[in-house]
Image (cartoon, coloured by chain):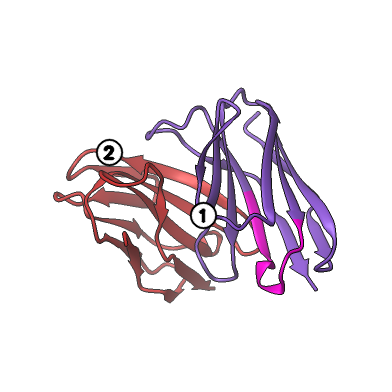
Chain colours: A purple, B red
Amino acid sequence: DTEVTQTPKHLVMGMTNKKSLKCEQHMGHRAMYWYKQKAKKPPELMFVYSYEKLSINESVPSRFSPECPNSSLLNLHLHALQPEDSALYLCASSQTSGITDTQYFGPGTRLTVL
Amino acid sequence: GQQVMQIPQYQHVQEGEDFTTYCNSSTTLSNIQWYKQRPGGHPVFLIQLVKSGEVKKQKRLTFQFGEAKKNSSLHITATQTTDVGTYFCAGLPTSGTYKYIFGTGTRLKVLA
């Protein structure tokens, strides 16, 4: 099973809402990633978790809060977002965070902030 | 900052024609990965190149890593409508933050 799942597929939220994005993989991977992708742009790395510990935070605003409850799950908690945060949020996983590891991407959550 | 540019930005080809996208990094790379993203989809890993001058083939796709490890190319022979999508390279710089930098992408349309 080489699948990364993400829920929900679509999310519309107001600027005062609190919501969470969820990501799950059952490949035994120990590195998980959050990316943000705007239309017609490449994915931008937000966070990297390695062995359930946050290893990279790409200076992401605190209104985005990642959480890795266990090695299979990755959450992204959203609070007080801005309309410019509307984008496709992609989760990915890899065996480790080694430089030759393949990243497997999930289908993404398309987020709209009103 | 470190940048990875791809050219062209867009390419429309007739089915059966060849297609090439070029990936150029401002810094030397340890390795480079290529991904394909179909319209409305997510990036899917295609291949990884590690050695200077490396060439790898996957059916109609040929991937090359430059001798100086600062550029790469993807060539598709005899395109098919199923090749439609955006092709991204992602390079890992030899110095700086330990993370892949995605290229700007090349969007391919294939006209039947």
Question: What is the residue that sits farthest to the front in this orientation?
Answer: A62
Q: Residue lying at the far top in this picture: please name it.
A: A28
What amino acid is at disc 2? Val
Horizontal relation, residue B102 to residue B57: left or right: right
Q: Quadrant of the C terminus of chain B?
A: bottom right
| Label 2 to label 1: alpha-carbon separation | 29 Å
Task: Give the crowd class for mark 1: few <14, some 14-19, many >=20 residues within 10 Å.
Answer: few
Q: Which residue is mark 1?
A: A59
Local crowd at mark 2 within 10 Å, few (<14), some, or many (≥20)? some
* Residue B89, x across and y down, in percent: 39, 55
Residue at 77% across, 57% down: A79
Dot 1: element: loop
User: Which residue corresponds to the image point at 17% horizontal and 45% vertical from the top-left?
Assistant: B53
Give the magenta range.
Answer: A79-90
Nearer to us: label 2 or label 1: 1
Given the image, on which type of amino acid does mark 1 rest?
Ser
Q: Tell me where residue A112 sits by quadrant.
A: bottom right
Residue A107 appears in the picture as rendered: no
Residue bearing the label numbered 2: B50
> Same chain for marks 2 and 1?
no
Q: Residue at x 71, y 70 (%)?
A: A82
Taking depth in this image into account, of B45 and A88 the one nearest to the observer is A88
Q: How many marks?
A: 2
Q: Element type at marker 2?
A: loop
User: Percent position (x, y) of residue B47?
Assistant: 40, 43
